[in-house]
Amino acid sequence: MNSPSIAPLRNVAALMGHTERLITRTRGLPGLGVFHGKSGSGKSTAVIVVANEFQAHVVQMKQAWTKAYLVEKVAEEMGATPRKKTTPYYIDAIAEHLAITDRPLIIDDAQYMLRGNMIELVRDIYESSLAPIVLVGEANLPHGLTKWENIHNRVLDWQETVDCNLADASKLADIYCPGVDIAPDLMQAIVDASSGAIRRVATNLDKVKELARRSGKKKADLALWGDQPFFTGAPPVTRKPEVYPGASAALARKAARG
């Protein structure tokens, strides 16, 4: 039996419910949503699941994108063809497509839209279509949006991601550590060391799989893990260079000689 490729984590369910609220909102209510949380919390994975469930259009922002490139990529994603290849015509084509299909638009890594007035494009598209639009981004996204009241007051729902817990970690183990029975003490240690970040939990689970493979074990616990460090995301500590007797004097003589 193949292991699942995407775990049904709580953040997947959170974005699912968030998007559904926008789609089924009462007529006259705003239709923007903001799904936000720290890096590594599984937002992009949740986007994939929700996009498939609701046939949503998805565009992942890049830091180097401009306004013109953004609307071009959104139009390309939904197959909308503008009458002229300029930003206003692209916005009209996008809005017309969304208004007709009423399919949600999800913009991932939306924090990159906070530069300049790029976020204003979202308002233009929304006002012309009234289609559900979900902005997915990092933890600072809600605060950044407060600078644009005409965007901020069009948000119907704010949804923050939750940290990975034992239940989530167990589901991740089916993907990243299949065939290995992970004892509760090791699973709890992994969750604690990972600070609730799904990406770090997955990395540590992969290390458990490799450890179990090397040791020929089908069950892993803290005793098997031993004293090796968990992956915490912290940079490695740089060791200080060893200083040998007489080294400082030798270096001083070398510097004096020029």
Image: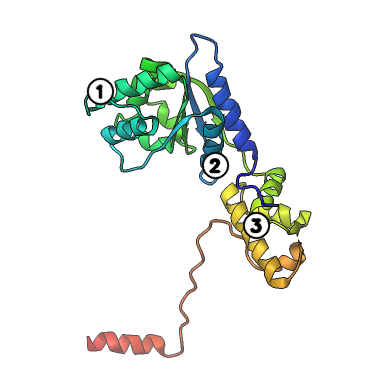
Q: Amino acid at mark 2?
A: Thr
| Residue mark closest to the camera, 2 vs 3 | 2
Q: Place residue 114 in its image quadrant.
A: top left
> Marks 2 and 3, Cα distance to the nearest angstrom?
17 Å
Pointer 3: residues within 10 angstroms few (<14), some, or many (20+)?
Answer: many
Q: What is the image's colouring?
A: rainbow
Which residue is tagged 2? 45
Asked if residue 37 shows in the view, the reply is: no
Could you say where residue 63 lies in the image, as x and y percent from the top left? 34, 42
Pointer 1: residues within 10 angstroms few (<14), some, or many (20+)?
Answer: some
**Residue at x 67%, y 67% (from the top left corner):** 211
Q: Mark 1 or mark 3, which is nearer the start of the sequence? A: 1
Q: Would residue 122 appear left or right of 207 to someone viewing this image?
A: left
Q: Place residue 115 in its image quadrant.
A: top left
Q: Amino acid at mark 3?
A: Leu
Say which element carries label 2.
helix
Say which element carries label 3.
helix
Residue 62 or residue 150, whichever sits in front: 62
Q: Residue furthest top?
A: 28
Q: Mark 3 or mark 2, which is nearer the start of the sequence? A: 2
- Residue 34: numbered disc: none
> Marks 2 and 1, Cα distance to the nearest angstrom?
32 Å
Could you say where residue 16 lies in the image, as x and y percent from the top left? 59, 30
Q: Would residue 217 appear left or right of 84 to someone viewing this image?
A: right
Could you say where residue 75 lies in the image, as x and y percent from the top left? 34, 30
Residue 201 or residue 69, whichever sits in front: 69
Which residue is tagged 3? 205
Which residue is tagged 1? 88
Q: Amino acid at mark 1?
A: Pro
Q: Mark 1 or mark 2, which is nearer the start of the sequence? A: 2
